[in-house]
Structure formats: C-alpha cells, structure tokens
C-alpha cells in the first residue's frame, strides 16, 4: 500500500543520523567533559531513588533487631564501628612509620605528623555490571567528597571516588580493569604498577622484568606517586609469579588486602594538600 502523505527521511537515514549524533556526543563529552555538570545534576536527581531502593533492606534489618534491645545495639554498634574504622586507618600506617621514622626525622628535621582527615561512609549500592566494579556510598559533595579521593576499608585501599553528587558518590574499585595504582614492595621498595583484572579477588602486575626481585607473599604498599593515594597503605599481596623466558615479562598476580566482596563501612581520606586546597577555595568563594 502506497502512503500518499508520508514525508521525512527514511528509516536507514534516521538510524545513520542518530548514530552520528551519538558518536559526536560521546567524543565531545570524553574530550571536553561537556556534560560533567549535567551528570552531577542527574546523579542528584537519581539519589532519592537509590535511597528508596535501599529502604526495604533497612526496614527488614530494623525489624529483626527489635528482638535484642533495638536502640541500645544500634547505638553501640554505630559508635564501635566508627571508632574501629578510625583506629584501623591509623594501624595500617604503623609499620610503615616505624620503618621510615629515623630517616624522615633526619631529612625533614621534624616529627612525622598525621594531619589526614578521615570520615566514615556506608555502602549504599553495588553496580550490577559484570564488566565494571563500582559501588555507591552515602557521602557526597555536601560532606566535602571530591573526585579521585582515596577510599579504604579496615584492611587496605579499596579504590577512589569516580563521580560525586550532592548526597552520594560513586567509587571505582581497584579490581576494575580500568583502574591502576602505583605501589612499592614493602621488603625492598621495588616500584610496580598494579591494575585491576575484573575479578574482586585478583589483581595484575604487568611489565615486570624477569630479573625483578619479587617473591610470593610480598606485601605491596601505595607508593604515593600520582598524588591520589597517600604513601604506605596496604594494597595487595603477591600470590603468583610465572617467569616464562619465552615471554618478554613475568606474569605476576596479587590478591587485594581489602575485602572487596564484603564491603559495608568505608573510610574517606583527606590529605593535608587537599585540605589546604579546600580552604583556599572556600576563601575565594567568600
């Protein structure tokens, strides 16, 4: 049947136009971050839905806890968890500070000071994309959270802030294939780069020469390079080293120190540098 009043481009032309427009918007956003502000507003609009999605689980948990002194257990648990997270953050640096104490005092002629601000956050949601490892926490711009901010759990480094909205933030885990972190071996200070493998229980160390001094069981600490993660925090433990001379590099695998599959409470860090930058920004605004 002929349509006498049909007009406009054909369906293939419409499809081609839509594809070209999509590619242009993707390239524009990637190169110029043209939609960064738009994403912040969209994340802020979506955050109430995330809270609503999390509400049934909270209601079930509250109902079960009524059998054992509801108010007392919850208040005690929140206080103890907060204190434990702050103490674990201090303990992770204890070994590093003891090893470097004498050398730092002689170089800097002053005692080592921990001016890092710490805030406890709680897990809200986990990304269900099998090709990406991201989570959402309940702290956002109103709490001073910023992009690339380091995130820890009670044992080691978890990842870094990827996106920030007003009341929550998205965290990119170190197990994600797009994530990389500079580290050093605690035993001999050999510097390496650890990348995500896509598995929560395994990390990869690439471009390692066969002659490098690595051993199974070596602990990898953040090196402080890149100005994202502070120095001395545990990252992973080497679990496998395959030196195949037919390959240009050794195949090295490691296990994250942080329990990436059991996250609940997280620790956000502010270094002295970021605190100073935030103070300067506030003064300029005023």
Image (cartoon, rainbow, N blue to C red):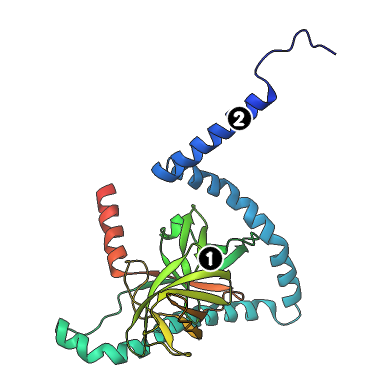
In this view, the residue in front, 147 or 196, is: 196
Dot label at residue 176:
1
In the rendered view, would you say 152 is above or below 188? above
Left or right placement of residue 190 versus residue 91 in this view: left
Q: Position of residue 92 (x, y in %)?
A: 41, 84
Disc 2 secondary structure class: helix
Q: How many marks?
A: 2
Left or right placement of residue 278 versus residue 124 in this view: left
Q: Residues within 10 Å of mark 1 (few under 14, many from 20)?
A: many
Q: Position of residue 156 (x, y in %)?
A: 47, 79
Q: Residues within 10 Å of mark 2 (few under 14, many from 20)?
A: few
**Residue occupying the point 42% across, 74% down:** 248
The image quarter in which residue 132 lies: bottom right
Mark 2 vs mark 1: give the one in front: 2
Q: Position of residue 70 (x, y in %)?
A: 69, 77
- Mark 2 vs 1, N-terminal side: 2
Dot label at residue 16:
2
In this view, the residue in front, 36 or 245, is: 245
Q: Position of residue 123 (x, y in %)?
A: 58, 67
- Tell whether label 1 touches label 2 (CB within 8 Å): no
Disc 1 secondary structure class: loop
């Amino acid at each position: 049947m002929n349509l006498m009043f049909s007009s406009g481009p054909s369906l293939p032309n419409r499809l081609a136009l839509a594809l070209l427009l999509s590619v242009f918007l993707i390239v524009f956003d990637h190169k110029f971050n043209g939609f960064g502000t738009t994403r912040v507003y969209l994340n802020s609009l979506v955050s109430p839905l995330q809270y609503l999605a999390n509400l049934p689980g909270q209601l079930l948990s509250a109902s079960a806890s009524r059998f054992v002194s509801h108010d007392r257990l919850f208040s005690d648990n929140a206080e103890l968890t907060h204190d434990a997270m702050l103490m674990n953050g201090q303990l992770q640096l204890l070994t590093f500070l003891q090893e470097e104490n004498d050398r730092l005092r002689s170089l800097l002629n002053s005692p080592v000071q921990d001016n890092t601000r710490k805030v406890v956050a709680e897990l809200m949601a986990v990304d269900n994309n099998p090709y990406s490892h991201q989570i959402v926490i309940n702290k956002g711009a109103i709490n001073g959270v910023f992009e690339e901010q380091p995130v820890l759990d009670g044992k080691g480094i978890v990842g870094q802030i990827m996106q920030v909205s007003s009341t929550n933030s998205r965290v990119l885990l170190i197990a994600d294939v797009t994530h990389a972190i500079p580290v050093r071996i605690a035993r001999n200070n050999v510097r390496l780069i650890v990348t995500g493998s896509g598995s929560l229980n395994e990390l990869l160390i690439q471009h390692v020469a066969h002659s490098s001094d690595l051993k199974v069981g070596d602990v990898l600490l953040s090196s402080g390079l890149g100005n994202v993660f502070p120095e001395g925090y545990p990252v992973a433990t080497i679990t496998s080293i395959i030196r195949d001379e037919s390959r240009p590099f050794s195949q090295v695998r490691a296990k994250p120190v942080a329990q990436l599959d059991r996250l609940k409470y997280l620790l956000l860090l502010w270094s002295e540098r970021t605190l100073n930058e935030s103070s300067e920004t506030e003064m300029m605004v005023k």
